[in-house]
């Protein structure tokens, strides 16, 4: 699937880049149904030390593997990525009237907070080696949108030259 034209998200993404005053903006579309972060759950069993054995949901594990595969295809340049903005786009409910179908910031009930959609992307960027530590993002923004043309994640990364950023770090 090709990247859809989403002028409102692009406008916000470019304005955020100007505010942050970071010279590099890399944006891309991931054609995947967004899934919020899910904490590992207890299996009900205990280890020999008495601690509960934790396990990730298999659907979430598969989602993270798919994210890494899609991110690898994007060939993200090697910069010091300092900020991320992720937009989770989900389709309209089937009962929505055609005249109501525009890009909007409609609530996606029961699907998690907007910031929970960014966490799997940050973790996948770290797994891929694009980001050394996802805690280095000093600004994280997120949004949830209803979108006419299906589901996906629109990601914006903001950064500085990797060599330039290393000079200024302690």
Image (tube, rainbow, N blue to C red):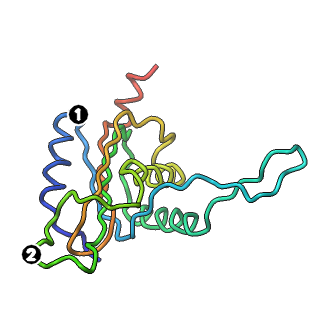
Q: Quadrant of residue 28?
A: bottom left
Q: Residue at x 13, y 71 (%)?
A: 100
The secondary structure type at the circle numbered 1 is helix
Q: Position of residue 87 (x, y in %)?
A: 29, 56
Residue 74, labelled with which disc? none
Residue 109 in the image, given as x and y percentages of width and height = 35, 61
Q: Residue at x 18, y 55 (%)?
A: 9
Residue pushed farthest right?
48
CA separation, marks 2 and 1?
36 Å
Query: Dot 1 corresponds to which residue?
Result: 20
Choose between 100 and 9: the one closer to the eye: 100
Q: Is residue 58 left or right of residue 109?
A: right
As drawn, 101 above or below 37:
below
Q: Residue furthest top?
A: 170
> Can you say which quadrant of the picture contains the N terminus?
bottom left
In the displayed orientation, state which residue is furthest to the left.
99
Give the class, few, some or many, for how many residues have Cα within 10 Å of label 2's Cα (few <14, many ≥20): few
Question: Which element carries disc 2, helix, strand or loop?
Answer: helix
The total number of labels drawn is: 2
Depicted 80 relative to depicted 88: above or below: above
- In the shown orientation, is residue 18 left or right of residue 138? left
Q: Is residue 59 above or below residue 166?
A: below
Seen at 49% across and 68% down, the residue is: 66
Query: Picture coordinates of residue 150 (x, y %)?
Result: 28, 74
Callout 1 crowding tier (Cα within 10 Å): few <14, some 14–19, many ≥20: some
Closer to us: 59 or 25 = 59
* Residue 111: quarter of image: bottom left
Provide residue 85's location: percent of width, then percent of height. 30, 47
Residue 159: quadrant of the picture: top left
Mark 2 vs 1, N-terminal side: 1
User: Given this view, does label 2 or label 1 mark the residue nearer the observer?
Assistant: 2
In the image, which disc is placed on residue 99? 2
């Amino acid at each position: 699937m090709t990247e859809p034209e989403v002028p409102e998200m692009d406008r916000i993404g470019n304005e955020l880049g100007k505010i942050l005053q970071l010279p590099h903006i890399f944006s891309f579309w991931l054609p995947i149904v967004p899934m919020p972060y899910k904490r590992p759950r207890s299996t009900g069993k205990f280890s020999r030390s008495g601690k509960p054995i934790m396990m990730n949901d298999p659907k979430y594990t598969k989602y993270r593997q798919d994210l890494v595969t899609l991110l690898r295809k994007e060939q993200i340049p090697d910069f010091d990525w300092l900020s991320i903005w992720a937009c989770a786009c989900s389709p309209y409910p089937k009962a929505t009237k055609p005249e109501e179908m525009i890009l909007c910031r409609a609530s996606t009930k029961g699907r998690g907070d907007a910031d929970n959609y960014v966490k799997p992307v940050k973790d996948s960027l770290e797994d891929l080696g694009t980001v050394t530590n996802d805690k280095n993002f000093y600004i994280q923004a997120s949004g949830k949108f209803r979108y006419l043309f299906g589901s996906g994640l629109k990601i914006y990364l903001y950064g500085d030259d990797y060599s330039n950023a290393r000079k200024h770090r302690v």
